[in-house]
Amino acid sequence: MKRVLIVVLGLAFAGVNAQEKWSLRECVDYAVKHNLQVIQNEYSKQIQDSNLKIAQRNYLPSVSANMGNNVSFGQASLGTGSIRNDRFSNSANLSADILLYNNGRLEKTVRKTQFDVEASHYDIETIKNDISLQIAQQYLTTLLNKEIVKISQSAAENAKKQLDRAKITTEVGTTAQTVKAEAEAAWAREKQNLKTAEVNVGRSLFALAQLLQLKDYKNFDVVDVEVSESLTPQLIAVEDVLEKAYGNQPQIKAAESRIKAAEAQTEVTKTSFWPTLTASVGIGSFYNNLLNTSFSGFDEFGNAANERSFFSQYKDNFGQQGGISLNIPIFNKGITKLQVEQSKINENIAKTTLEQQKLTVRQNVQQAQFDADANYEIYLAATEAEKSTKLAMDFADKSYAAGRTTIFDLNIARNNYANAQGSVQQAKFNYLFSLKLLNFYSGIPLSL
């Protein structure tokens, strides 16, 4: 029973600590959701969203209320003399004002802020795209390193077989001790190469985990993806990719939105040339109390009257007011004209930024196509070299077995074959990334 319990607990522990392998899509989705730079820019967009709400609420009237209390003691001047004036006063007012006309300033401000919100949204998408491409490149690098491990494992196994054979032939006296020594050295070198390849896998996984900003990088691994051994040349034209990229790349859309925002800002600035018409209304009342006497004068019958109560005065002193004011700009030192000129300069800056973004996208697409074509040619050449070195290794193996070549020649042939295999894998994954990059600019999501 105790042994059964130990086995069950061991299996449960192994299940808890089993590595979860991530696909490229999962890596990309996680990165764009948890990356701190993305989160920071989302906060910036929230600020722009708030600015838009503020601009929209400027259509509403401004309403304010105020209440004041004042008390005074001592003498107050009265003609050529003075009079005792101990007084307490209280007042309350409620007012509202609203902009009636300013050549559409409010509407133009809202439109300008909407373009700012659009640009902020596209900025976030641009950062997500940059992170996605970094993730994809590092993911493919990890897969490449895993393929190199497989090649190194195969080379180490062959070296071990060669060592086992050399031990036998040396013991029976058909080969010299130098053959056994060289076989041991070759096996040691292949084990070192294998360990280096395994470390490179760990290093690339660590780099990918850092891009994902994972805390537990030690239990992180990626899904092994089988890449087709037969690759075909890409037939996508640069102009076709560019046409799609200009329409879907967020950095270009952000630049276009900022041009519209700059043009809208110019229109907002021009409204300062126009008059401003404002309407206002208000209500209020007040209360007065002489602190040194309750006498407030005489009534209509000539009788002495005492001061009225707080609420009575507020009722009797209640008043309303309304008005319309017109502010006509005449001369403000030419500042408005200069501000319009500055807005025009900002329009030109925004237009230049758009051209820069288009140029960057064009260069990236052209570079991706050039790399795709070049990497495919390298892949074809590496494939031919792999076939040749494989044939040379087979001949060297047979010649060594027949005693016509040395173990040094055989090891050289094996090293050449292993290097050729690595070159094929390198070219294959480079070509694959170039294709993914072209597809990305065409609007196709990253995946394997």
Image (cartoon, grey):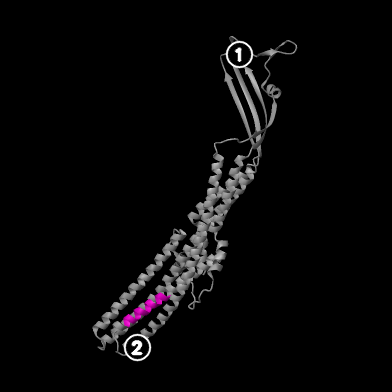
Mark 2 or mark 1, which is nearer to you?
A: 2
Front-most of residues 204 and 55 = 55
Above or below for 19 versus 44: below
Front-most of residues 76 and 181 = 76
- Please state the extent of the stretch shown in magenta in the rendering: 410-424
Q: Position of residue 258 (x, y in %)?
A: 55, 52
Let me know if residue 1 appears in the view: no
Q: Position of residue 406 (x, y in %)?
A: 28, 85
Residue denoted by label 2: 398
* Dot 1 amino acid type: Asn
Which residue is located at x 45 percent, y 78 percent? 380
Mark on residue 292? Answer: 1
Above or below for 382 versus 328: below
Q: Is residue 326 left or right of residue 1?
A: right
Let me know if residue 343 appears in the view: yes
Dot 1 crowding, Cα within 10 Å, few <14, some 14–19, many 20+: few
* Dot 2 amino acid type: Lys
Residues at discs 2 and 1 in contact (Cβ within 8 Å): no
Q: Give residue 84's quadrant in the image.
A: top right
Which residue is located at x 46 percent, y 63 percent? 134
Which residue is located at x 56 percent, y 42 percent? 337
Front-most of residues 6 and 442 = 442
Q: How many marks?
A: 2
Q: Position of residue 180 (x, y in %)?
A: 27, 82
Which residue is located at x 64 percent, y 40 percent? 102
Q: Is residue 209 left or right of residue 270?
A: left
| Earlier sequence position, callout 2 versus callout 1 | 1
Q: Is residue 289 magenta?
A: no
* Callout 2 secondary element: helix
Dot 2 crowding, Cα within 10 Å, few <14, some 14–19, many 20+: some
* Callout 1 secondary element: loop
Q: Position of residue 192 (x, y in %)?
A: 33, 72
